[in-house]
Structures are given as C-alpha cells and as structure tokens.
Image (cartoon, grey):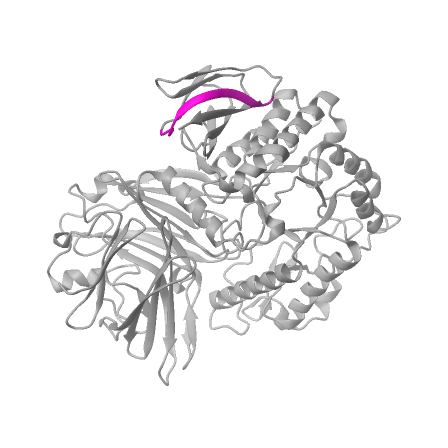
Amino acid sequence: MNLLLHIQENSIHMAVEKTAAGTLHLLHLSPEPFQPASVPENEEARDAYNMVEIHRSGESSRDVHGNKHCGSGPGGDTAMPIYLAHRDTRTPDGRKLEFVQAAGTLKITSTYQFFDGLPVLRCQTEVENTGADSIPLEYVASFTLTGLTKDSTRPWDEISRVHLPFNSWMEEMQWQSFSLPELGVSRMSSSGFSMQRIAVNNTGSHGAKEKMPIGIFENSQNRTVYAWQIETHGSWAWEIADRPGGQLYLQLSGPTERENFWFKNLRPGEKFTSIPVAVVIQQGQAVEAFQTLNEYRRRIRHFRAVDRELPVVFNDFMNCLMADPTTERELPLIDRAAKLGAEYYVIDAGWYADGPWWDTVGEWQPVAERRFPHGLKEVLDHIVARGMKPGLWLELERMGKNCPLAKVWPEECFFRRHGRRVMENHSYQLDFRHPVVRRHADDVVARLVAQLDVHYIKMDYNIEIGPGTEIDADSFGDGLLQHQRAYLDWLDAILAKYPELLIENCSSGGLRNTYSMLSRLSLCSTTDNQNYLQNARISINCASSYCMEQAGVWVYPLAAADEEEVAMNMVSALSWRPYLSGQIQALSQEKLDLIRQGVELYQKDLRQVLPQAVPDWPLGLVDGHSAWGVFALRTPGRIIVSVWRFEGGADQLEIPLVHLPGTVTEVKRLYPLTLPVEYRWQPNEQLLCVSQPEKSARMFELRYTV
C-alpha cells in the first residue's frame, strides 16, 4: 500500500493512496481511524475507491451499473485518471486539500475544504480541457466515496438507514427514515451487487420542490453519520448503492444528463466547476449532524451588518390582504403593526397593477391608481412615519406573457426550448445572462431604493420552468445552470451596492430554500401553509434545513382565533424570525397583547440568542401525526424549550434534557405568561414534565451552572 496522504483533521480521518500505476484511491473518509485491513488488497477491487466519477460521452464503464453513476472511465474507455500533483494549504476557513489528476486531455482537480473545529468538508470538482478537441461531459460528481460501512462487521442492509427530507409547497421539511431494503437496495447473494440504487434528484428551477437537496446516511453499528447538502437552487442528483465487491458508495452532484438534461461540451481551454456540496462526517445521530450543518451554514454566509439585526417584519399577505393591497386597507394595518412592535412593513404582491396582475407582471412601476389614489409613495411614507422601514414584493426572474416588455425584448432574454419560449403560469422565465435582463433588474431595484426608499425586498419565485433553456447552451440543463449562476452573480452585486437593503428568499414558500441562495440572502420564507397547526410542525423541523436566524415563520392569527391559537402562532416563530401578518384588525386587545408580549420577548432577549444558539430536538422531528412537538435552543448556561401540543396523546409530556453540562438552578415559563400550564423539573432524571391543553404552545427557560 502506497499511502499518498493519511491525515486526521477536525475528527475526520482521511486516507488517499497512489498506486504504482499512478491512479488515486480515496480509501477512507470517516470519523474512525483508518484500518488498512478494511480495504481489499486486490487491485481491481480497490479501483472501486476512485476519488471522482466523470462520464464522457462514448466511453465505457468499468462496472455493470445500470443507471448508477459509478465505474466511470474518464481516462479513456475503462482507464483511470493519473495522479499529477496535490496541494495541502490553508484558507481562512481551515485546511484545504486539492488533488490534480489527468484523464487524457481532461485535467481534474478535486477539492476538499475543511472548516476548523467542524467535522465537515466542502467539496467540488473542476475539469479543464487541455487538449485541442472538445470533450463531451455527461456527469461530473462533486463528491465520491466508496466504503460507507467498510469498518462494520454486520451486513450493510442490517445497519444502514437513509433519512430523506420530503418537501412540497405548504408541506416543507417532512423527514422520513428508511432502511436500504425499504428503498429497494438489498444485498444480492449470487451476483454480489444490485442494479438498484437510492437515486434522489431534482430537475428544474425549484431546487426543493419534492425533496430538499440534503440527506443523511446513518450506520447504527458504529454510530457513523454522513450528512450532506448540495448547494444549488436548480437541478441536482445524489445516489447511494452497492458496487461489485459489496461496498456501499455515496455520490453527490449538480445536474446530470441522465437525470436532469445536462450536458457540457467542454471546449479546448475551457473549465467547468461542479456544484459545491458539504458533507458532515461524524459519530452520533441525525440531530448532531443537523447541529453541525447549522454551524457550517453560519460559516459560509456572506454577512453584512444589516443581516445581524434580525428585525421583526410585518407582511400584509398571509391570512391578511392576500395580494390585494389598497391605501384604505393598508393605513390602519400599518398603524396596528407599528403598535405590535414591527420594525419593517412589507406590501406584498399586487402593488404595481389595478385588478388581476399575474400575466402582466414585469415592469414593476407604481402605477396602480385605483389601489393607491394618491400614489404608492403615500403609503410607504406612512410606514416611515410610524417608525418602520418599508418593503415591497418582487419576482424579477419572471415576466407575464402580456407585459409590454415581453413584446419588444430580444428572444434571447427568455428561456426557450425547441424553438419556443417556455411558459409557466402565464409567465416567461427571464435569462440573467442577457444584459437587457440584468440592466432591467438593476433599474428596478435602483428605482425602488432611490425613489421609494424601500429597505426590504421579498424576492419571490413562483414558476417551475423545467429542465432549462437551449439559448447559448450545450443542453437545457447547461442553460439553466448558467442562468442560475448569473442570477447569483447579480444578487451579489446588488447586495454589495445596497448594504442596507434586506432581501428575503421566497419561492412559493420554501421551494428554493437552499444554500446557494441562503448563503447570500438574509432570511427565507418557511412555507405558504395557512393552517397554524401545520405551520408549527414545519417551523419545528425547519432548523434541519437552514439556520434559525434565517427562517421567517408566519404569525398570522385569524379573526376567529382564540388566545391559545394566537399564542401558538407566536411560539411557532419565537425560536426563528417572527413574520407578522393575519387579521390583526379584528383581534381583541387581549389577543393583540399576546402578540406584543411575544414580540417584546423576541426583541429584548431571543434575537440576541439566535445567532449563537445550537438547535435541538429532544423528542426528534415531528410529522403530520405527532401529538406533541419540542424544539430547544441551547446556549451556554441556558436552554430555551418550546413545547407544542397538537391533538391527542398523553396529557403530560416528559422531555429529556440530557447532556446538561451543569446543575439546573432555575426553570420558568417565558411565554405566554397568562395561559394555563403545569410544569416541573425532575433533576435526577433530567426531565422537564409539562401538562398543557390540546392545540396550545408554551416556551420555557432553564438556567444552569457548571
């Protein structure tokens, strides 16, 4: 065995081998130390441990793989890439390893970025054509690892579980857990491997419309967890399966030809960099992986000073004006929102047109005279006069089919497939690679900021445009990826130009809540679900997918809401970012006082805690049948515990708060202060026992000393 590199970094053990033939094998990437005996000595079997998988058109595979992406031969037919060099350097984030290989005229660089103090890697693959002929690419993995369970003594189908985050409009972040055989991947006694794979992917412009681009693999024997997120809001793919020889592998990528209509014809001198992916590698359970991902997400965010303020936002849409704003309706809402403690006030969709507007959207001019007889500026000025900062809704990537601009702009401004413009929901998709589109978007933002003094943009995206566009692209998927990278470049420029402007990430709720967007934008909409019970369930789970301080959770009580419903609305938002709305004009003073009490708790206390807090789920995540839900914020010397009782279940809940580093000295309720609840702390068992009514929520604080 010729080990090129054997390291331990942030509790991750990594072993890379260079063979006598010059090929690289990633033999080990685990929280456990490397045991050479865990890898077969046979050279052919060791070839399954290659560092990267790349499919070039016209080349064979080294494996009988069916639809699997393993066994590629980018070195020429079935040959392996040849090692050229490696670099071991440091960046502000931590240690960085780069391995350079050559597959003929294709130069391949595999990057592993460590993060100091975290068991996580950020991985990408760069390919460069160093030859004189184009190289047709069908698949480029960002991360490849064989041997997920090679250190275990029990069969992998008995010890492996995969956790999947199902996601949909108004049904976000619904995690489910499966054994591999439950998903069709079983050990095959005769052939030694299966043609099945666990293949999870997304095609189109809603990057999380069916599942979030994250997942977890758990080995119950040695408590090893691999968790990952693919950092794109477009097309992506990952798979887990077995290879000949019986080892499980994990591969993560952006778009592919087979799944996502992506193909790249890499021209001489051209480079392509894959989608970045993050991989947590640690021992523990899913909760610990979520906590690591939470801290990693904080590390990669592009913070500006305004992003640290975590203001309370009122938005007039949900259970409120529902995209039908007028001066008459807005002015009293603005007054009441200010009294509740809102710091920003956002006028949602419809501000730019009289009457129906979906198929005419695109100019973004404040010309709705019937809605605003004295102009939109009158309403925005009223927001400022009440001590709040104004915001507006936008959807800049889309243009209605009847927008006047759609008739005069060049065809290259719009997504096209098979010679026709792509249409979704009576709208066209704009292509941010085109200078006309980008200038238009620049002008819209400049007009809103300079002329209307807008400080907040709710940037929405309500169309699913499919595989992509054929304009200036090698494939539909290539066009989509180019557009999305151009859009991110545009966002970066806007955020740099307007340092005081907050931009919210929204996409029919949470259909693009991924870290290509959230590494840049201040907060996100968690859902469009209008049921406060389901909104609570979604909020409890949302920290599995993004940071608490970025999750905008609706507080939107209806006119008929009782005090318990109002309190649950508030508790569901207090561990995240309260996003006020609802029928507040019809609520009694007692119910308004409940909202105000929650807002004051958030402003004076909780928002100072959020950016450093560690998320915890003492009873695990919830689903649509959970009778109770619990979420906790862990900080030094303090734990803040939110408890929801939905319907059914036992009258008393015992909440285990294990791993406390000290002795509990105080237990008290934080919110609401007036509604009934019974609670006690059992120090010997470290249990918080709570009894409360059905359809209710409470928040508690436990302080401890070390």
Q: Quadrant of residue 705?
A: top left
Q: Residue at x 55, y 53 (%)?
A: 303
Q: Residue at x 61, y 43 (%)?
A: 310
706 sits to left or right of 492? left
Q: Quadrant of residue 124?
A: bottom left
Q: Is residue 260 above or below residue 537?
A: below
33 sits to left or right of 487? left
Residue 405 or residue 549, whichever sits in front? 549
Could you tell me if residue 262 is visible in this image? yes
Quarter occupied by the C terminus = top left
Q: Quadrant of residue 132?
A: bottom left
Residue 641 or residue 72, whichever sits in front? 641
Quarter occupied by the N terminus = bottom left
Residue 31 screen position, x and y as percent: 26, 47
Q: Residue at x 43, y 78 (%)?
A: 270
Main secondary structure found in the magenta portion: strand
Residue 402 screen position, x and y as percent: 72, 60
Residue 460 or residue 604, whichever sits in front? 604
Q: Is residue 562 above or below residue 204?
A: above
Q: Residue furthest front?
A: 706
Q: Residue at x 59, y 33 (%)?
A: 605
Residue 563 screen position, x and y as percent: 65, 21
357 sits to left or right of 655? right
- Over which residues does the magenta segment extend? 659-672
Q: Residue furthest right?
A: 374
| Residue 665 is inside the magenta segment | yes
| Residue 469 is inside the magenta segment | no
Q: Is residue 342 above or below residue 256?
A: above
